[in-house]
Amino acid sequence: MLVAELITPDSVPDWKKRGFIQGEQICCEDCNLSYNNEHHEILRDNKKVAYFFFADSIDPSKMYLLCHGCLFKHIKILADGEEAELLILDDNNEYQCKFYPEDMAGYDEIDLGSSDDDLLDWLPED
């Protein structure tokens, strides 16, 4: 099972204190999509962007900070055409998700700047 932890705007100060987020911007390590915490909160509340810490599948002690688009691209690669299970953790809940290859077909062509509202429908309301 793959595991990702949702970075909520309320959790950012704690992640910064622990050294996992540095500077004023939250930045995806793959595509460099970055926002300050205020903009991150607005975009997340409107289901436009979400950031996650995603554990390395080979070395779980390594974590990557990824936007939702890059997280799904990583899952697609790791799933290698098979069904993938993902546990998403946030401050209060756990979400067990399944990704099916047919739902992810063509995902690598999606423009990260486009409106992928349906990909973030599961995000909890604050």
Image (cartoon, rainbow, N blue to C red):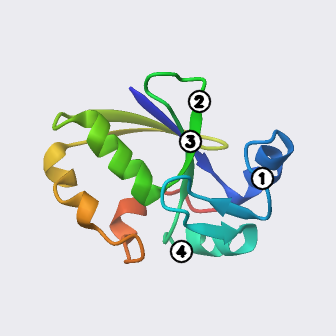
Q: Quadrant of the C terminus?
A: bottom right
Q: Secondary structure at mark 3?
A: strand
Give whichever of discs 2 and 1 has the lower sequence position.
1
Observer-side mark, 3 or 4, equals 3
Give amino acid for label 1.
Gln
Q: Are marks 2 and 3 in contact (CB under 8 Å)?
A: yes
Give whichever of discs 1 and 4 has the lower sequence position.
1
Q: Residue at x 22, y 52 (%)?
A: 104
Give amino acid for label 2.
Lys
Q: Are marks 1 and 4 in contact (CB under 8 Å)?
A: no
For disc 4, the marked residue is 46
Q: Residue at x 42, y 54 (%)?
A: 70
**Residue 39 position within the rendered picture, expressed as x and y whole percent measured from the top left:** 67, 75
- Residue 17 is left or right of residue 125, and the answer is right
For disc 3, the marked residue is 64
Q: CA distance from mark 3 to mark 4?
A: 24 Å
Give residue 116's quadrant in the image: bottom left
Q: Quadrant of the N terminus?
A: top left
Give whichever of discs 4 and 2 has the lower sequence position.
4
**Residue 56 position within the rendered picture, expressed as x and y whole percent measured from the top left:** 49, 30
Q: Are marks 1 and 3 in contact (CB under 8 Å)?
A: no
Give amino acid for label 3.
Tyr
Q: CA distance from mark 2 to mark 3?
A: 7 Å
- Residue 12 is left or right of residue 104, and the answer is right
Q: Residue furthest left?
A: 102
Q: Residues within 10 Å of mark 3 (few under 14, many from 20)?
A: some
For disc 2, the marked residue is 62
For disc 1, the marked residue is 22
Q: Residues within 10 Å of mark 4 (few under 14, many from 20)?
A: some
